[in-house]
Image (tube, rainbow, N blue to C red):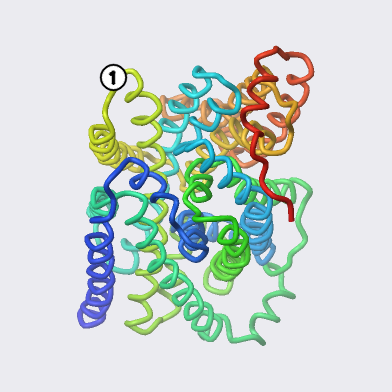
C-alpha cells in the first residue's frame, strides 16, 4: 500500500508541475483586464471547447451526481450524461456561441452583467446580476471542493480538510498567474487528461470482476437495478436532473464567458463538434461508471456510506493499477480545479469590474489587482461553505437553479427576440430567482435548526425547482415584454442589433 501511494503521488506531482509550468509560461502574456477575463478574445476552437468542457464537468459530476443518480435510477442515470452532451454542449454551442461571441466582441463586453446593461440599458440590472452571481456561485464552488476531497479521503487517506486546502491553493495560484489565458491553457492540458483518463477508467471498470465485462453489463441491465421500472415521481426527479444539468449551463456566466473569448466565427463553429465529443465521452463515461454501483454494493451499504462516497469506494473496489489510479486522481483534480478556476474568475471579475470599479473609478491595473484579491477571497469563502453538512448534489442544484433560473431567459432570448423589453427581463429575472430560492431557503432554515418535515423535504427538491425557475422565467420574460414597454426599449434594440451575426 505504501509503494502504491508513492506511485500515485509521483503521478499527481508530475501533473501539478506541468500545470504550474503552463501557468508561469502563459501568465507573462496577461497584461490587461481583457486578457485576464476573456483572454484578449484569442482562443481557438480546441482551447475554447475544452475550456468549456472542463468548466462543465468536475468532481461534482463524477462523484456527487454519478453516485447519486446511480443509487436512485441505476442505468437510467446515463440519460443525464447523454442530455449533457446533446443539450448542454451541442445545442448550447449551436444556439449561443456565435451570436454571443459577435455581441461581446462588437460591444467589448467582458462579463454577463455588462451584457445585460448593454442590452437593456439598466445599470440596476447589472448591479443585481453582480451580487447574485458572486453570492450564489459560492455553493457551487464549495461542491467542487467536497467532490474531490471525498475521493482523496477514500483513495489516499488524506485528511478531508487538508485536501480542500491543497485544491484551494492550486486554483488560487493558477488565477494569480494570469487569469483566463492561463486557465484556458491549463484547461487544454486538463481536458486531454480527462479524455485519456475516462477512457482508461471505463475499460478497467467494465473488465473488473465486479462487473464482468460486456456480458456482466448485459446481465446487470436486465436485473432489478439495471434498466429498472421506476415510479412517476422518480421519472420526474430524473428528468429534472437531466434538464437542470443540461440547460442550466445556458444561463451560467462561467460557461457564457467561454464564448466571449473565442477568436472568430469559424472557431465558434468548429467548437460545436469538439465540445459535443468531449461531453459524450466524459459525461457519458462518468454517469455510466456511477450507474454500475449496484454491482459493487447493496442499497443499504450505499445509503450508509452516503451518495458522495459511492464512486470513491467503487473505484477503490475496482482494484485499479497504481498508475491508472494516479491518472484517475489527476482526472478528478483536473476537472475540479478547472471548474473552480472558472467559477472563481467569473464571480470575482464580475464584482470587481461591474460593481466596485465603476463606483471607485479605478484604473485598469488596479481593477486587475482587485480581481485577483477577490479570487482569493472567493476561494476562502467557498472553503468555509464546503465544511457545512450539505450533499454535493444539493449545493450544486441551489447554485445552478438560482443563477440560471434568474438569467437564462433574459440572456438567451435577447439574442433572438428583438421585442424583449427591460420590464420583461426584470419580470423573468425576479420570477426565476424567487422560484429557485425556495429549496435553498429551506436548506438555510434546516441549518438554523428548523426540523419541520415539509421544509426538510423541499430542501431536497433543488433540481425540480431549478427547472421550474427556468421555465417560469421564460414565460414571464415574454408576458412582461408585452405589458411593460417604453421608448427606451426601442433605442436599446437598435443599438444592440446593429451588427447581426451572419446566417448559416
Where is residue 185 drawn, in percent x and y? 36, 62
Q: Residues within 10 Å of mark 1 (few under 14, many from 20)?
A: few
State the image coordinates of residue 58 (x, y, percent, origin top left). 45, 57
Q: Is residue 449 above or below residue 183?
A: above
Question: At numbered mark 1, what does the secondary structure look like: helix, strand or loop?
Answer: helix
Residue 267 seen in render: yes
Q: Is residue 301 visible?
A: no
Q: Nearer the viewer, residue 211 or 162?
A: 162
| Front residue (pair 159, 114) | 114
Q: Quadrant of the C terminus?
A: bottom right
Q: Residue furthest front?
A: 498
Q: In this rendering, is residue 360 above or below 463?
A: above
Q: Residue at x 53, y 27 (%)?
A: 442
Q: Position of residue 137 (x, y in %)?
A: 44, 38
Task: Name which residue lies at 41% across and 66% down.
Answer: 188
For the N terminus, the quadrant is: bottom left
Residue 372 appears at what percent x and percent y?
26, 40
Q: Which residue is mark 1?
A: 360
Residue 465, quarter of picture: top right
Which quadrant of the view contains residue 267?
bottom right
Amino acid at each position: 500500500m505504501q509503494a502504491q501511494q508513492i506511485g500515485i503521488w509521483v503521478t499527481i506531482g508530475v501533473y501539478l508541475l506541468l500545470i504550474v509550468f503552463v501557468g508561469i509560461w502563459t501568465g507573462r502574456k496577461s497584461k490587461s483586464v481583457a486578457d485576464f477575463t476573456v483572454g484578449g478574445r484569442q482562443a481557438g476552437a480546441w482551447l475554447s471547447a475544452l475550456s468549456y468542457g472542463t468548466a462543465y464537468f468536475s468532481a461534482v459530476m463524477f462523484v456527487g451526481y454519478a453516485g447519486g443518480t446511480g443509487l436512485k435510477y441505476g442505468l437510467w442515470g446515463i440519460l443525464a450524461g447523454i442530455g449533457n452532451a446533446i443539450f448542454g454542449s451541442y445545442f448550447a454551442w449551436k444556439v449561443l456561441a456565435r451570436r454571443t461571441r459577435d455581441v461581446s466582441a462588437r460591444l467589448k463586453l467582458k462579463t454577463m452583467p455588462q451584457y445585460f446593461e448593454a442590452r437593456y440599458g439598466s445599470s440596476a440590472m447589472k448591479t443585481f446580476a453582480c451580487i447574485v452571481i458572486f453570492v450564489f456561485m459560492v455553493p457551487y464552488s464549495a461542491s467542487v471542493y467536497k467532490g474531490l476531497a471525498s475521493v482523496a479521503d477514500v483513495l489516499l487517506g488524506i485528511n478531508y480538510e487538508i485536501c480542500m486546502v491543497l485544491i484551494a491553493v492550486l486554483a488560487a495560484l493558477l488565477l494569480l498567474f494570469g487569469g483566463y489565458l492561463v486557465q484556458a491553457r491549463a484547461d487544454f492540458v486538463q481536458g486531454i487528461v480527462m479524455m485519456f483518463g475516462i477512457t482508461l477508467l471505463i475499460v478497467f471498470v467494465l473488465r473488473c470482476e465486479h462487473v464482468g465485462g460486456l456480458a456482466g453489463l448485459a446481465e446487470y441491465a436486465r436485473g432489478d437495478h439495471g434498466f429498472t421500472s421506476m415510479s412517476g415521481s422518480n421519472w420526474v426527479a430524473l428528468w429534472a436532473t437531466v434538464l437542470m444539468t443540461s440547460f442550466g449551463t445556458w444561463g451560467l456566466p462561467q460557461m457564457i464567458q467561454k464564448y466571449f473569448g473565442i477568436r472568430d466565427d469559424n472557431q465558434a463553429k468548429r467548437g460545436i463538434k469538439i465540445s459535443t465529443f468531449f461531453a459524450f465521452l466524459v459525461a457519458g463515461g462518468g454517469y455510466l461508471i456511477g450507474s454500475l454501483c449496484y454491482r459493487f454494493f447493496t442499497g443499504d451499504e450505499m445509503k450508509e456510506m452516503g451518495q458522495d462516497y459511492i464512486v470513491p469506494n467503487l473505484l477503490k473496489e475496482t482494484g485499479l493499477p497504481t498508475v491508472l489510479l494516479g491518472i484517475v486522481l489527476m482526472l478528478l483534480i483536473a476537472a475540479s480545479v478547472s471548474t473552480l478556476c472558472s467559477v472563481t474568475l467569473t464571480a470575482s471579475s464580475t464584482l470587481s469590474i461591474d460593481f466596485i470599479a465603476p463606483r471607485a473609478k479605478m484604473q485598469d491595473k488596479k481593477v486587475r489587482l482587485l480581481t485577483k484579491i477577490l479570487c482569493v477571497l472567493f476561494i476562502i469563502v467557498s472553503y468555509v461553505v464546503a465544511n457545512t453538512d450539505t450533499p454535493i448534489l444539493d449545493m450544486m442544484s441551489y447554485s445552478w437553479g438560482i443563477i440560471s433560473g434568474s438569467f437564462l431567459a433574459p440572456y438567451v432570448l435577447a439574442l433572438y427576440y428583438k421585442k424583449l423589453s427591460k420590464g420583461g427581463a426584470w419580470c423573468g429575472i425576479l420570477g426565476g430567482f424567487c422560484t429557485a430560492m425556495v429549496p435553498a431557503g429551506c436548506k438555510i432554515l434546516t441549518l438554523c435548526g428548523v426540523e419541520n418535515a415539509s421544509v426538510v423535504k423541499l430542501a431536497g427538491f433543488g433540481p425540480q425547482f431549478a427547472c421550474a425557475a427556468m421555465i417560469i422565467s421564460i414565460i414571464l420574460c415574454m408576458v412582461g415584454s408585452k405589458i411593460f414597454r417604453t421608448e427606451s426599449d426601442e433605442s436599446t434594440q437598435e443599438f444592440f442589433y446593429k451588427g447581426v451575426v451572419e446566417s448559416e
